[in-house]
Amino acid sequence: MGYAGWVMLGIVVSVAGGGLVWFEKPLLTYFHPLNLNLLVRLVTFGMILVTAVPLSVFGAWSIAVGTPVAAVAWVAAAAFFQWTVALSSFYYALRISTISVVMPIVAASPLFTAVLAAAFLGERLGAATIVGLAVTVCGVALLTRYMPAEEAEMPASQVGETLVVASQSPDESSRQSATSPNRPPARLPRRSQLLVLVPALVATISWGAYPIFVEAAERAAGGPTVGMMLESQLLGAFFLVPFLTARRRLSRGWRPPPGSGRRVVWFIVAMGVLELTWGVFFFLLVEELGPVLTGILLTMAPVFAVLGGVVLFKERLSVLAWIGAALALVGVFVASVGGAA
């Protein structure tokens, strides 16, 4: 596959990454963030096992199955930062805020990749990276300053009657429908802003470290392997277990409403398919295009996610919050394109 083909694949992976949030947001109404993370890790592991492994065994692609011992530690570090820390923190932020607020913040992860590479690998930060970082920081500050206080829910009728918010009473629904659509959303109290901003930033920094460990693992293994993909998912689930048992979440944190079991299963399967697309092809994109160009392509994932938040979830932000979100995304793009150049 030529360069254009890999670029198109990167766009598909970006859509998959953005689409994940459309399913994660409603499921967090019923699942604790750690429980949902564990469940999706196991589902994705199973999907990689039944799809990617046969492709390698029967020679449908050139990716090997096994992973050299030298790469295992790097895969474990990548799994810890990607799944245990970053995704769990992201779920905590997403559960109490909106897609339109959280996604522009975590979109800054490529900037932290550049900063961490400069700090630990001796790479030099270019002028574009510094400018992009400054613009993104301003955008995140503006976005969190004018963060909306009300959380939008997905209307069941808009997405095939997907999930009905069981916790919302009819009185609450009537009050929301009576609210004027032109009224600007109220802002969150400062303490609630921190409850969104802190886990979102933890997720952003951790996701920034992830490509560095992936590249180190691929160098140690001589390229991506299916074993690396499987180990990443399985170790991510394994690292979650101590946190779940400490808070007794293995027996709690599962609250699907009566009659929604089939819908929940379909949502989880859809998440597994999108995670499979992201998890498998991310390794290939890093190998073929490098971490910088891959980062540029994947910066489109938050854009798709925010569009879904507006269309599917009817999210509303103030004008200043939208400006902050746009600045955050533009800063990432400027830094990524400048780094590639």
Image (spheres, rainbow, N blue to C red):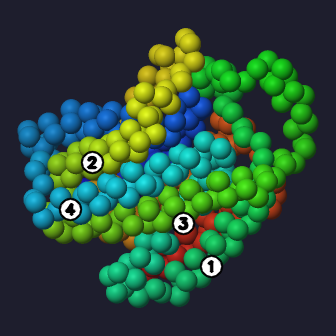
Q: Secondary structure at mark 3?
A: loop
Instruction: Identify residue type, mark 2.
Output: Leu
Q: In this rendering, is residue 66 above or below 165?
A: below
* N-terminal label among 2 and 3: 3
Residue 293 at least partly seen: no
Q: Secondary structure at mark 4?
A: helix
Q: Residue at x 8, y 38 (%)?
A: 58
Q: Secondary structure at mark 1?
A: helix
Residue 196 x/y as whole percent:
64, 54
Instruction: Identify residue type, mark 4.
Output: Ala
Within 10 angstroms of label 4, few (less than 14), some, or many (20 or more) residues?
A: few
Instruction: Identify residue type, mark 1.
Output: Ala
* N-terminal label among 4 and 2: 4
The residue that disc 4 covers is 73
The numbered mark at residue 108 is 3
* N-terminal label among 3 and 4: 4
The residue that disc 2 covers is 235
Within 10 angstroms of label 3, few (less than 14), some, or many (20 or more) residues?
A: many
Quick one: 39 or 115, which is closer to the camera? 39
Residue 267 x/y as whole percent:
47, 28
Q: Nearer the viewer, mark 1 or mark 2?
A: 2
Instruction: Identify residue type, mark 3.
Output: Ala
Query: For the residues marked 4 and 2, what is the alpha-carbon distance in whole angstroms?
Result: 11 Å
Q: Nearer the viewer, mark 2 or mark 3?
A: 2
Query: For the residues marked 1 and 4, what is the alpha-carbon distance in whole angstroms?
Result: 33 Å
Quick one: 65 or 31, which is closer to the camera? 31
Residue 10 falls in image quadrant = bottom left
Q: Is residue 246 left or right of residue 177?
A: left
Dot 1 and dot 2 residues touching (CB under 8 Å): no
The residue that disc 1 covers is 134
Q: Nearer the viewer, mark 1 or mark 4?
A: 4
